[in-house]
Amino acid sequence: MDYILYLFRSLYRKLVWIILGALLIALLVYLKTANMRGSYNVETTLYTGVVSGYGIEANNVGVNWAIAQNAIDNLINIIQSESTQKRVSMRLFARVLVKGSPNKDQNSITSASYRYTYDHMKNSPHGKELITLIDKSSEEKTMENFIKYEKADVNNYIYGLFYYQHPYYSRSALKKIQVSRLGNSDLLKVNYSSGDPGISYNTIEILMKEFVNEYRILRYGETDKVIEYFRSELDRIGNELAKHEDDLTKYNVENRIINYYDETKEIAAINKEFELREQTVLFAYNSSKAMLEELERQMDNNTRQAITNLSLVDKLREASSLTGKITEMETVSANNAKDEQQLKNYKDLLNRTRRELSEISDQYVGDKYTKTGIARANIVEQWLDQTLAYEKARAELEIVKQSRIDLNDKYQFYAPVGTTIKRKERVITFSEQSYLTNLASYNEALMRKKNLEMTSAALKVLNPPAYPISAESTNRRKIVYMAFLGTFLLLISFFILIELIDRTLRDSRRTRKLTGCPILGDFPYKSRTTPYSTIYDDSATRYLSSGILQFFTKREEGSPYILNMLSMEEGCGKSYISEFIEAYWNKLGLNVRKLTDGIDFQSNSSEFQLANSIHELYIPRDEDILIVEYPAMSNSNVPTPLLREAQLNLMVVSAKYGWKATDKIMLQKLEAQLGAKPYLCLNRAPRYDVENYTGMLPPYTPLRKVMYLLSQLALTENAIHWKDIWKRKKNPRKGVAEVEEDDDD
C-alpha cells in the first residue's frame, strides 16, 4: 500500500508535465485536423434468401444453420474480395470519367470528384494516352478499353489505380466497405463512407451489381462444368451402349437366335423325349431283328426259296421304302394338310404292297404245313410282317441316329453361344448401370443449377442506396479527446515505468529501497539561491542534528563523541553537510572539532591504514564532538577499528547519484566492517522529500498548503480546521476544550 501511495505521489509531482504534454499533443492534433471534412455515408440492405429462401433440392427440408452461416460468410467474403472490389474500382473510374462533368454535378457525380479524377489521370506520365481510352458514349466500352490497357506493371496507371493510395479507387479506400449480417436473418447491411457523396453513392450501386455477377459466375461456373462433364459422359456411354446392343443383335441374327433361353429349354425338352424314343426304337429294332432271324431258322428250303424270289424281293424293298418314308414322316411332321395327304397315300400304297407280297408268297408255298407241323402260310405271313417291322425299326433307328447327330450339333452350337451372349449382356448391363448413374448425377446437377438460379434470383437489394445530401459530423472533437487521453495515459505509463526501473536515488524512499539502509535525514538541493534557501538549510540541519545527537549517549572518559562522515564517491557533499552540522553545534555552545583527510591525517599513509584508534591520528583536546571526514570509499579503505570506535557512521549519498553494482559491493563491505547497516543522509534531495522530515517549508501560501496536504494525502485536514473555526465563530462563549469535546462526541 505504501508503494502504491508513493507511485501516486510521484505521478502527482509530475502531474503538471503530464497535463502540459497531453495538452500540447491535443493542440497539435487540433491544428492538423483543421481542414477535416465530414464523410458521406451510403448504406443498403441486401436480401440473400439463404435461410428462409425456397429451394428445390431434396435436402431443403429444414434449415442447416452451419451451412446457412457458411453461405452468409461466403457472400460477405465475395463482397469484400479483391476481385469484386477491383471491378468496382474500374467501373467507378470509368463512370466518373464518362458521365461526370467538370462544371456541374450531374448523374450523381460531383464536379469536384470528376476534376480530381481527370486531373490526376491527365497529369500522370501517360495521361494523353489514357485520355484516348475514354469513350463518352459508352461506359462499357471505356471499361473494356481500361481492362485491355491494364498490365501488371508499376508504371501502368490503371494497375496502380487500385493497388496504390488513390482516395477513391484504391484497395485501401474500398476496404472501408463494411458488410454485416442483421441478426440471424437473410439480410446483409452494406455501408460505405467517403469524402465525396457521388463516390459513396456510385460505389455502393456498382458494388451491388458486380457482386451479383461475381456470385453467379462463381456458382454457375462450377455447376456448368459438372453438367458439361456428365453430359459428355452420357453421350459417350450412350454410344457405347448402342454399339453393344447393335453388336448383340447382329450376333443373334447371324446365329439365327430369337430367344436363347427359351430355345435352350426347348432343346433340353426335345433331348429328354428323344432319349425315350431312342430306347423305344432300339428295342423295336432288336425285337424285330431277333424275331425275323427265328422265323428264317424255322423255314424249309421251299419257303426260303419263296422269300428269295425276285418279285418278292422287289415288293419287299418297295414295302421297306414305303415303311421308311412313313416312319420318317411320322417322326418329323410339319403338321400341314399336304404332308398328311402324302402320308395317307404312302400308307395306302404300303397296304397294297403288303397284299401283293402275300399273294406272291402264297404262290410259292406248296405244302400247307412244315415238318414241325407249323402252317407255312403263317410263317411267311409272320416273316413278311417282321420284315416290314424290322425295316420300319431300322428306318426309325437311322432317323434317330441322324437326329442324335443334329441334336449334338445343336448342343455344340448353343454352348459357346450362351457364354458369348451372357458376356455381351453383362457388358450391356454394365453400360446401362453407368448410363443410369450418370443420368441421375446429371439430373442432380441440373437441379442444383436450377436451385442456384433461384438462389441468385433471390439476391435482391431491399433498400436501394440513396444519394447522401448532408455529410456526417466529423470526429475531430473525438480525435482530439482521444489524442489528449492517449498522451495522458502514455505519459503516466512512461513515468511509472521510469519509477519502476530507474536506479537513481532521487528521494529517501527510493534510497531506502535500493540500499536497504535507514535514512537519518535529507539535505535540500540548492539549484539557485532564494530568500528561503537559508530556511531550508537550517530546517534540514536542525532535523539532522537531532537525529545524530540521539546516538551520543556513551563515551570513554577523556574522549569526545565521534561522528564519522563517509561517502561512496567524491562529490556527494559530506563536507558541505559537515560544515552546517559543525556551525549549528557551535551555535548550541558545543565544542566541536573536525578532522579532514589531507589536512589532519593522510589516508594513504601506513599510520592511517594500521590505526587502531582515532587518537593515533590527532592529539585530543577538550572538544565535545569530533567530526571525522573520511575519503570516499572508492578511493581509500577506512580501517575497521576507526569505524567501530565512532558513535555514528553517517554515509552521505547524493539524490542525483545512481546506485550501481559497485556501490552495492562497497556497501556490503562496509556492513561487514560495522556489523550492521550504516545510516544514510540524502544530499541534494528535492524539497517535497525534505518536507517528509521537516514538515512544510515556506512559502506558506494557501495554494502550497493545499498542494502539500494533497501530497501527504491529508485530504480532510482543511475541512476539519474550517469546521472548528466555524464552530468558534458560531459559539464564541464556548472554550476550545468544549468545542473539542463536542467534536469527540
Image (cartoon, helix red, strand yellow):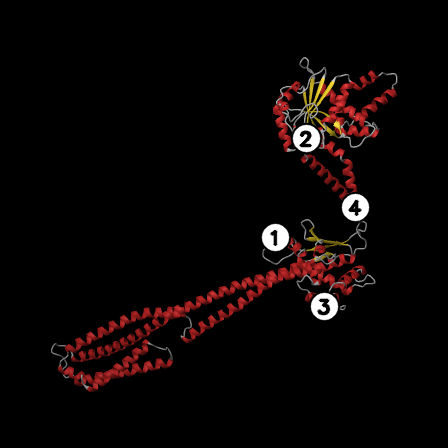
Q: In this rendering, would 292 be left or right of 606?
A: left
Q: Nearer the viewer, mark 2 or mark 3?
A: 2
Q: Are marks 2 and 3 in contact (CB under 8 Å)?
A: no
Q: Nearer the viewer, residue 581 or 265?
A: 581
In terms of secondary structure, where does tag 3 sit? helix
Q: Amino acid at mark 2?
A: Glu
Mark 4, residue position: 28
Q: Nearer the viewer, mark 4 or mark 1?
A: 4
Task: Using the numbered discs, state the Cα–Cα distance from disc 1 to disc 2 in whole angstroms.
Answer: 77 Å
In terms of secondary structure, where does tag 4 sit? helix
Q: Nearer the viewer, mark 3 or mark 1?
A: 3
Residue 745 appears in view: no
Mark 2, residue position: 569
Q: Amino acid at mark 3?
A: Lys
Task: Using the numbered discs, state the Cα–Cα distance from disc 3 to disc 1 in whole angstroms.
Answer: 40 Å
Mark 1, residue position: 67
Residue 288 placement (x, y as % from top left): 22, 75
Which residue extends farthest bottom? 311
Residue 119, by quadrant, is: bottom right
Q: Earlier in the sequence, mark 4 or mark 1?
A: 4
Q: Amino acid at mark 4?
A: Leu
Q: Nearer the viewer, residue 387 or 259?
A: 259
Q: Earlier in the sequence, mark 3 or mark 4?
A: 4
Q: How many marks?
A: 4
Q: Nearer the viewer, residue 614 or 184?
A: 614
Q: Amino acid at mark 1?
A: Ile
Q: Nearer the viewer, mark 1 or mark 2?
A: 2
Mark 3, residue position: 141
Q: Are marks 2 and 4 in contact (CB under 8 Å)?
A: no
Task: Using the numbered discs, state the Cα–Cα distance from disc 3 to disc 4 in whole angstroms.
Answer: 48 Å
Residue 375 placement (x, y as % from top left): 16, 78
Q: Nearer the viewer, mark 3 or mark 4?
A: 4
